[in-house]
Amino acid sequence: MTDLSTFPITQKWPAQHPDRLQLYSLPTPNGVKISIMLEETGLPYEPHLVDFGSHDQMSPEFLSLSPNNKIPAILDPNGPGGQPLALFESGAILIYLAEKSGQFMPTDAAGRYETIQWLMFQMGGIGPMFGQVGFFNKFAGKDYEDKRPRDRYVAESRRLLGVLDQRLAGHAWIMGDAYTIADIATFGWVRNLIGFYEAGELVGIQDFSNVTRVLEAFVARPAVVKGLGIPKRG
């Protein structure tokens, strides 16, 4: 059995099952990408809650695994060559888990790169822009009298939704008939935009019927239902 005790993060979050992949996360749109992926693949894992309220993400133990102090992060005791592998950044983790499990990524080279392309679209556009809409609509930014920053991010979010909506026209999922890591990365953010961020009306989500159609299919998946609540908040 792999000894994970040499990794400082296990001092704060001891591994009860050191033979399983260790997940350090919080059920945010970025965090649930990985819990959903793990539930979809069936890979055995052990989740650990990184509590932002207690500033866990700034602890030396967490920073030893994720130096950018962002969730999610993983520690896989059975990484390449049978050696432990630590990873941060949700997109990198999704690609790794897809390749480890042989699931949710096309096997042909062209399809693989096209899927990664749409994953990057989420990471570089949808995530950052939707997050800014959330800040200016629901959190501290909502009290700013000047609404130009909010409106700028709303306009960009609508543009991104339009790109996604066009891609989904006639498609069951982003890559066509196949459900992939691109969908896992994207639709948790769409759900959060119109749910937790309460910005559905603001961005005119009703104008993007393909997006809402696929979102409904996404949230109906059993692995998504389960993954959205992992790790459980304290």
Image (cartoon, rainbow, N blue to C red):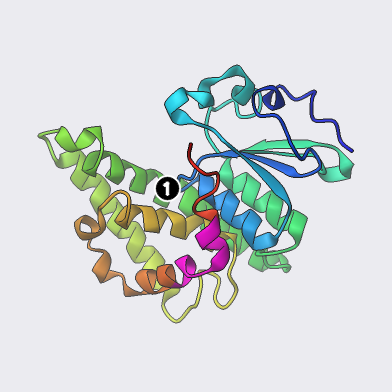
Q: In the picture shown, does residue 123 fall above or below 170?
A: above
Decide whether the magenta segment is chiefly helix, strand or loop: helix
Residue located 38% across and 64% down the image:
163
Whole-percent x, y for residue 76 in the image: 75, 41
| Magenta range | 217-226
Whole-percent x, y for residue 3 in the image: 85, 31
| Total numbered labels placed on residues in the image | 1
In the depicted view, which residue is nearer to us: 92 or 52?
52
The answer to which image quadrant residue 79 occupies is top right
Q: In the picture shown, does residue 62 fall above or below 82?
A: above
Whole-percent x, y for residue 197 in the image: 30, 48
Q: Is residue 176 left or right of residue 19?
A: left
Residue located 38% across and 58% down the image:
191
Q: In the picture shown, does residue 191 fall above or below 66?
A: below
Image quarter (top left, top right, bottom left or bottom right) of the N terminus: top right
Q: In the picture shown, does residue 162 fall above or below 74?
A: below
Q: Is residue 5 left or right of residue 190?
A: right
Q: Which residue is mark 1?
A: 127
Whole-percent x, y for residue 131 in the image: 35, 43
The answer to which image quadrant residue 142 occupies is top left
Residue located 35% across and 58% down the image:
160
